[in-house]
Image (spheres, coloured by chain):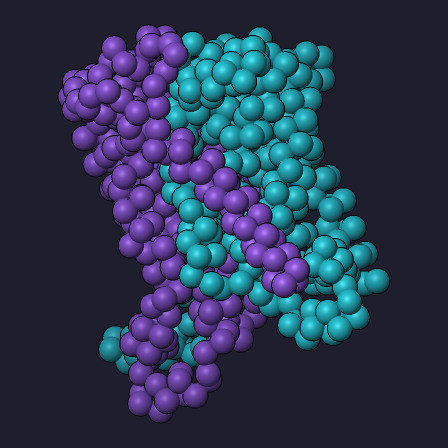
Chain colours: A purple, B cyan
């Protein structure tokens, strides 16, 4: 009796702690959503109410009027998709070479790849800015996309994935007379759909939420993305709280939906990146 | 012509040659956009360059000497080190605690875990906007709620003595889900038998946590420690979107200072690059220390 009581109270304590932490995560997010629907005069009152007395879509109207948020969203989408899709293929190709081919200089090249991970972005950012500027790619999509196409972590993840596939697969391909590229595209690549989806999901999320990088390589309003465009809007002296909340909600909703739909990929991708790292 | 084309095709189709073709796109891009900028950074740090990339002048090590005498540089370095020294241990301890509570793959634990992961899909900008307002001393809910239990109205992000720690809190809030996820994965790999045999010996849950779980997931802890330290030394996003380095530079970190000297006020690209080189050196030294300790510990 006392033992089961003890177990019950331990489990109750555990759930209370976990619920409290969950509340700490969810309540601020909920607060943001509620506040985006709050009339302006209810935002700047003291003491604040948690639940709004009435709801309005005015804040969304305001944010559309104040900043070209649809352009920002379009730019975020273009950047996220056109960096992530090619980068996953580029990572897969390089990872495949490291995992399945024996060639001269393999160890040296692999070490170089590893070492590029050690370079903090801040060191290369100013020369990169100058380089992109000199190439005439400042404030262009191409200038934003090109430097982000080679993702070293992606190469590592794909390498460890390919290393786990049986050799018989590519030998069968060679017997069928396929070229090395044919083997890669027709046989090996279809095997690693889950790994590629994981990389895409994590890549799109990282690109969508990236702040410093687009700040660095663009200045024109028409080239801003949600993350940096909103940050600059909020950074102005006269902040419109309601509009800022509405903008934040617009920027968060697509990734929240992606997370709800593809949670498995977010979580598993993160978990394996830790173990393999 | 066709003959030689076929020869070329055959040559490149040999696995030991095809490998280079597979590596070409990644290495070409890494070379142009990582290696060249890295090499160029050493050069740029010895130059005086305006934002319009005009008036380039070689100044040798002057930029580095200037950094040593720049109180804002030391202040930013100090803030960065304080941030790292507080954020990383806090993040690791908290994530270990949470991971231990949700290790088992039950449905409810999975639900908890997906909630903890949620802030990661929110951009730093959105997180910054959110916390700025919730913590605002005039209209925010948390300062208000604290006054109802008798505390003064605290200006979390405006008070110079606590603003940096508020950012530490927001940072842990935003990323502990990643750390927890990695710890959970590692904890699930610790052999069940170890727990069973220690249970027979009468060890309590707490004893088990410290004598089995922690040693069992040591590689994951090292991984998090090293990556979080490197990440925290480069902290930028949350500072940029919450305080912008204020009040009175008390939350200015090295990267926000470098960024502002490169792109916003009193712009000098060479000087900013020299400071980023100093940051690189600091990161390198700290990582080498951590790596060598890790290797030493793994040998024991």
Q: Residue furthest right?
A: B300
Does A216 sit above or below residue A265?
A: above
Q: Residue at x 81, y 63 (%)?
A: B299
Q: Is residue A64 visible?
A: no
Q: Residue at x 61, y 57 (%)?
A: A5
Q: Point out the image quarter for the C terminus of chain A.
A: bottom right
Q: How many marks?
A: 0
Q: Is residue B83 visible?
A: yes
Q: What x and y, as percent, mark residue B53?
A: 44, 19
Q: Point out the image quarter for the N terminus of chain A.
A: bottom right
Is B127 displayed left or right of A178 in the figure?
right
Q: Depth check: B157 or A7 in front? A: A7
Q: Depth check: A159 or A242 in front? A: A242
Q: Residue at x 60, y 24 (%)?
A: B165
| Residue A73 found in image quarter | top left
Is B65 displayed left or right of A99 in the figure?
right
Is A123 displayed left or right of A268 in the figure?
right
Q: Depth check: A125 or B85 in front? A: B85
Q: What x and y, as percent, mark residue A11?
A: 56, 54
Q: What x and y, as percent, mark residue A218?
A: 33, 27
Q: Residue at x 72, y 39 (%)?
A: B286
Is A215 displayed left or right of B279 in the figure?
left
Q: What x and y, as percent, mark residue B33?
A: 45, 42
Q: Depth check: A114 or A246 in front? A: A246
Q: Residue furthest front?
A: A1
Q: Residue furthest bottom?
A: A175
| Residue B125 found in image quarter | top left
| Residue B42 found in image quarter | top right
Does A123 sit above or below residue A117?
A: above
């Amino acid at each position: 009796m006392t033992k089961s009581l003890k177990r019950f109270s331990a489990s109750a304590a555990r759930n209370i702690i976990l619920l409290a932490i969950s509340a700490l995560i969810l309540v601020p997010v909920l607060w943001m959503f509620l506040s985006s629907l709050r009339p302006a005069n209810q935002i700047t009152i003291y003491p604040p109410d948690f639940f709004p007395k009435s709801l309005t879509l005015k804040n969304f109207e305001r944010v559309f009027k104040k900043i070209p948020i649809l352009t920002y969203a379009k730019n975020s989408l273009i950047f996220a998709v056109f960096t992530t899709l090619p980068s996953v293929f580029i990572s897969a190709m390089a990872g495949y070479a490291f995992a399945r081919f024996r060639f001269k200089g393999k160890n040296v090249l692999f070490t170089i790849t590893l070492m590029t991970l050690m370079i903090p972005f801040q060191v290369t950012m100013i020369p990169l800015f100058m380089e992109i500027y000199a190439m005439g790619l400042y404030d262009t999509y191409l200038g934003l996309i090109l430097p982000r196409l080679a993702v070293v972590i992606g190469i590592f993840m794909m390498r460890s994935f390919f290393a786990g596939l049986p050799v018989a697969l590519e030998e069968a391909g060679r017997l069928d007379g396929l070229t090395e590229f044919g083997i890669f595209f027709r046989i090996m690549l279809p095997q690693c759909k889950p790994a590629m989806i994981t990389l895409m999901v994590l890549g799109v999320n990282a690109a969508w939420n990236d702040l410093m990088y687009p700040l660095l390589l663009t200045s024109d309003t028409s080239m801003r993305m949600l993350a940096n465009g909103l940050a600059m809007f909020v950074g102005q002296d006269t902040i419109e709280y309601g509009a800022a909340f509405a903008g934040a909600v617009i920027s968060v909703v697509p990734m929240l939906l992606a997370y709800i739909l593809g949670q498995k990929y977010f979580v598993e991708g993160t978990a394996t990146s830790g173990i393999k790292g | 012509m066709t003959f030689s084309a076929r020869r070329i095709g055959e040559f490149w189709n040999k696995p030991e040659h095809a490998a280079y073709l597979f590596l070409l796109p990644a290495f070409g891009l890494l070379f142009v956009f990582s290696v060249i900028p890295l090499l160029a950074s050493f050069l740029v740090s010895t130059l005086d360059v305006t934002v319009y990339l005009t008036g380039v002048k070689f100044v040798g090590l002057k930029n580095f000497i200037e950094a040593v005498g720049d109180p804002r540089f030391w202040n930013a370095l100090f803030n960065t080190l304080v941030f790292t020294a507080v954020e990383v241990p806090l993040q690791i301890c908290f994530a270990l605690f949470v991971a231990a509570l949700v290790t088992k793959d039950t449905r409810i634990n999975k639900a908890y875990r997906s909630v903890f992961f949620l802030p990661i899909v929110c951009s730093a900008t959105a997180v910054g906007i959110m916390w700025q307002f919730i913590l605002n001393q005039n209209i925010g809910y948390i300062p208000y709620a604290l006054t109802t239990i008798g505390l003064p109205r605290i200006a979390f992000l405006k008070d110079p003595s606590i603003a940096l720690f508020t950012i530490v809190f927001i940072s842990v809030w935003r990323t502990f889900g990643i750390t927890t996820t990695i710890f959970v994965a590692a904890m699930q790999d610790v052999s069940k038998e170890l727990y069973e045999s220690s249970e027979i010996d009468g060890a309590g849950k707490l004893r088990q946590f410290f004598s089995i779980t922690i040693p069992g997931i040591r590689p994951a802890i090292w991984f998090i420690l090293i990556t979080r330290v490197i990440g925290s030394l480069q902290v930028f996003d949350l500072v940029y979107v919450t305080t912008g380095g204020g009040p009175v530079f008390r939350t200015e970190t090295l990267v926000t200072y470098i960024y502002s000297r490169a792109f916003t006020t009193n712009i000098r690209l060479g000087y900013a690059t020299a400071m980023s080189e100093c940051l690189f050196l600091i990161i390198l030294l700290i990582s080498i220390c951590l790596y060598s300790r890790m290797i030493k510990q793994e040998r024991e």
